Amino acid sequence: MPEGGAGIQAAATAAGGFYTGRTMSTSRQAPTHLRSQALQQRAERYFPGGVNSPVRAFRAVGGAPPFVERAEGAWLTDADGNRYIDYFGSWGPMILGHAFAPVVEAIERAARNSASFGASTAAEADLAERVTACYPAIEKLRFVSSGTEATMSAIRLARAATGRKIVVKFEGCYHGHADGLLVKAGSGVATLGIPGSAGVPEEIAQLTLALPYNDLAAVEAAFAAHPGAIAAVILEPVVGNAGCIVPAPGYLEGLRAVTAREGALLIVDEVMTGFRVALGGACERYGLDPDLVTLGKIVGGGLPVGVFGGKHRYMDLLAPLGPVYQAGTLSGNPLAMAAGLATIGYLQEHRDEVYTRLEVSAKAVAEGVAAEAQQAGVALTLNRVGAMWTWFFTPGPVGNYDEATTSDTAAFGCFHRAMLDRGVWLPPSQFEAAFLSTAHGEAEVQATIAAAREAFAAVKAG
Ligand SMILES: *Cc1c(COP(=O)(O)O)cnc(C)c1O
């Protein structure tokens, strides 16, 4: 068992297909991060901010980001030998826990046959068969290599299918970093978007309309203000990228009805929610039948995979059948297909066991930590759908992005650092959802709640 004083240590043992942890109580010492700090300094020579994706730099919470050396089940081990219970799961994909044996074996087997061919393989249709079985709205699909590519391609398809230009998105929803989707709200529904990043031309941002989430009247007003001009409405069906925000009753059904009536496509971006909030994602959970669906994260089992798919009549507009161009050198990569097949196959075959376990563990840890906040007198709002949730440091409620931004981000930062010191690694921003995996068990849940009790006391002490 590694030393390092994270305070909570677990012996991961395989039991019934799941890893279970065992907690040993030790007196707590602040962990050291000397090797991580040296690695960060070295990384800063090569990468802007020392990272290859900005949130990894911990700017929103302060403190130095630990460098990960390996992970197994629910546990991450850093370069200094500290161990952490993982609540971000590679930002979603690791739903079966880290280094899950069937996934590791599938990748090893595939690698022996060469990493890539740039020609078709049977595995692509094998994974497509599983994906379409889980998502009836996906009649045909394309594999790509990221969620960004998936949403970008879905929008191109929607514009081609409708001959219209404007895309409606919602404030706080993230759909990857394509220009047209990095857009902030203008003022009011008649005003088109403004760039959400330097380098995005106004002319491009103006083709995107950013509206408040959970507000159907705003969508109706947008269609009235731009008659016959809106190609698609794209959304996270449960928001994860502003922290977890739950769709109000009737909201998703309302979006389906208004888009159908107006001849615009409904694109449900399930890159995060797909295979997480249910095997069939939010489409299954809320009984939705969108025109196009995007997937990512879990569908690749930790390797880079994205999916966009939907009705035949739209998908058949793609080259080589139709006039919409889209391509990818590594699309349908054999290693990625193997990891996806092992992951989705396991989820399908152990469906009831998996989603029951995720619900039980997520409910226990999310509500257990929220109860500790209440005990400590820290104002907290818990939003949760299955194994995806956020503890917002605000009295709430949080039903849209503006309400999420009432959170006390300094208090969240203090909580994050106190939890990390106690061996619990939460997503390093108030505006991200936490996840757990089937490898998280009662021991991890109890250890997390115990850590939170101390962390809330640290928040109270300032
Ligand atoms: C992560 C995410 C994306 C972007 O996926 P990448 O693989 O990071 O490009 C798009 N949409 C949603 C909802 C996401 O959560």
Image (tube, grey):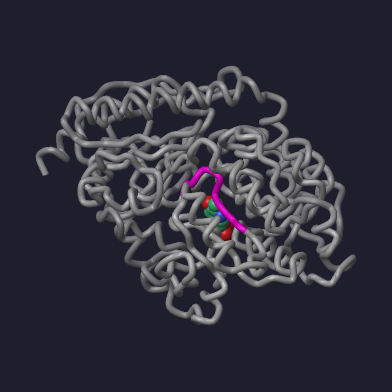
Q: Residue 282 in magenta?
A: no
Q: Is 408 positioned to the left or the right of 439 in the image?
A: left
Q: Is 333 positioned to the left or the right of 218 in the image?
A: right
Residue nearest the observer in this picture, 131 or 66: 131
Q: Quadrant of the N terminus?
A: top left
**How far across and down, in percent of the image, does residue 210 sit?**
48, 63
Q: Quadrant of the C terminus?
A: top left
Against 440, residue 398 (above or below) is below
Residue occupying image coordinates x 40% and y 57%: 56
Q: Residue 237 in magenta?
A: yes
* Residue sitting farthest toward the right: 321
Q: Quadrant of residue 371?
A: top left
Residue nearest the observer in this picture, 390 or 35: 390
Against 179, residue 149 (above or below) is above
**How far across and down, in percent of the image, does residue 269 sit?**
60, 51
* Residue sitting farthest toward the front: 224
Rendering quadrant holding ligand 1 = bottom right
| Res 262 seen here | yes
Residue nearest the observer in this picture, 114 or 419: 419
* Residue sitting farthest toward the left: 461
Q: Quadrant of residue 330?
A: bottom right
Kindly report the secondary structure that dominates the magenta region of the rendered protein. Answer: loop
Residue occupying image coordinates x 81% and y 46%: 139
| Res 305 seen here | no
**How far across and down, in percent of the image, does residue 244 sit?**
43, 43
The span picked out in magenta is: 233-240
**How far across and down, in percent of the image, does residue 200 sit?**
50, 78
Tally of numbered tags? 0
Residue occupying image coordinates x 81% and y 58%: 315
